[in-house]
């Protein structure tokens, strides 16, 4: 294991265990044990090559509410929330904009930005683990600042990532303030229709607490019911990779989420929502974002 990948994987748990001895000595990888995963079966470079083609044919993107903090001396501006709705997404490849209603501060996210955020834009980008047929990668630093991280994956028809430590500066009422933001995004090539039969998709979720930059991971299960044209989404076994422990909220779920004729789905409001879509021919994949119990997350799953 090279030193960069060792830092990406073992460094996640250094604070919790106080040492990297287990990893350096060739012992069990604590992240793999914590998440029930295996060593990555592909590289970050391999995902980058695939992502370029996926973005070129993508027609759908969903983003979560974006949360963050500023260095403003004004109490009302020290914590910011930037909501976004499907109507705030546009273009091909698609992009979505989240806007803080009082100040007009915005963050625009596109699938193409994740392609640009792979090396060399990032200081490091390494495959971390594989589970449920999906390999998660951890990207750090680069043009969004030294604290920036993106944790997620490119499947065959979609990509999903949680973003933390997004640093930018904005002019608010004639004063320049620094802002650190976090959120989630998922998108790809829509299937263009509802699934033709009831089915289940299994995969992974990545996330962060809405109020703090930490990386969460869990399992994702989506079940579509053809009769009601709705799906149930559950996110389980949620763990905190930075603290090397189960997250305080280990599960999140949504029931009876309407699925539209074009294969998109969505329900809920800021703080308690899920939105996304079925991707690829034969509805091979599903990807989206969710918010619940203080978690902001993204997910991707494959047809079983």
Image: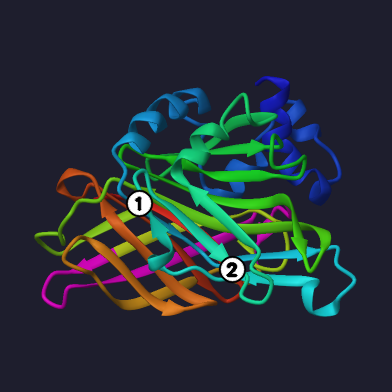
User: Residue beneath label 1, please?
Assistant: 301
**In the rendered image, which quarter is residue 122 located in?**
top right
Characterize the local packing of mark 1: few (<14), some (14-19) or many (20 or more) Cα atoms within 10 angstroms: many
Q: Quadrant of the N terminus?
A: top right
Residue at x 15%, y 47% (from the top left corner): 282
User: Residue beneath label 2, please?
Assistant: 295
Q: Position of residue 253 (x, y in %)?
A: 43, 73
**In the rendered image, which quarter is residue 71 located in?**
bottom right
Nearer the observer, 277 or 59? 59
Is residue 234 placed above or below 47 in the rendered structure? below
SS assignment at label 1: strand
Q: Is residue 221 visible?
A: yes
Residue at x 47%, y 47% (from the top left corner): 110
Q: Position of residue 153 (x, y in %)?
A: 47, 41
Q: State which tag comes first along the sequence, 2 or 1.
A: 2
Q: Residue furthest front?
A: 174
**Residue 282 lies in magenta, yes or no?**
no
Which mark is on residue 250?
none
SS assignment at label 2: strand
Characterize the local packing of mark 2: few (<14), some (14-19) or many (20 or more) Cα atoms within 10 angstroms: many
Q: Position of residue 146 (x, y in %)?
A: 77, 40
What span is in magenta? 223-247
Q: Position of residue 80 (x, y in %)?
A: 70, 71
Cα distance between the residues tagged 2 and 1: 19 Å
Horizontal side, residue 103 vs residue 96: left or right? right
Q: Is residue 241 visible?
A: no
């Amino acid at each position: 294991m090279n030193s960069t990948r060792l830092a990406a994987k073992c460094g996640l748990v250094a604070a919790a265990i106080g040492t990297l001895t287990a990893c350096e000595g060739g012992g069990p990888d604590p992240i793999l044990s914590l998440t029930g995963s295996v060593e990555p079966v592909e590289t970050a470079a391999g995902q980058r090559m695939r992502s370029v083609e996926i973005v070129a044919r993508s027609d759908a993107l969903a983003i979560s509410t974006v949360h963050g903090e500023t260095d403003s001396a004004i109490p009302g501006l020290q914590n910011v929330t930037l909501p976004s709705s499907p109507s705030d997404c546009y273009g091909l490849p698609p992009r979505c904009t989240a806007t803080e209603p009082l100040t007009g501060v915005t963050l625009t996210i596109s699938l193409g930005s994740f392609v640009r955020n792979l090396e060399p834009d990032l200081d490091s980008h390494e495959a971390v683990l594989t589970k449920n047929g999906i390999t998660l990668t951890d990207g750090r630093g680069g043009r969004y600042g030294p604290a920036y991280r993106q944790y997620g994956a490119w499947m065959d028809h979609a990509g999903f990532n949680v973003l933390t430590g997004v640093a930018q500066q904005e002019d608010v009422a004639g004063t320049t303030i620094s802002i650190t933001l976090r959120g989630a995004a998922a998108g790809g090539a829509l299937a263009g229709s509802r699934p033709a039969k009831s089915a289940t998709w299994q995969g992974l979720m990545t996330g962060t607490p809405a109020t703090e930059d930490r990386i969460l991971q869990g399992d994702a299960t989506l079940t579509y019911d053809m009769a009601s044209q709705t799906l149930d989404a559950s996110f389980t076994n949620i763990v905190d990779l930075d603290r090397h422990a189960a997250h305080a909220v280990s599960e999140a779920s949504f029931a009876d989420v309407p699925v539209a004729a074009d294969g998109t789905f969505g329900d809920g409001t800021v703080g308690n929502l899920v939105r996304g879509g079925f991707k690829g021919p034969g509805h091979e994949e599903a990807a989206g974002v969710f918010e619940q119990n203080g978690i902001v997350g993204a997910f991707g799953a494959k047809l079983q």
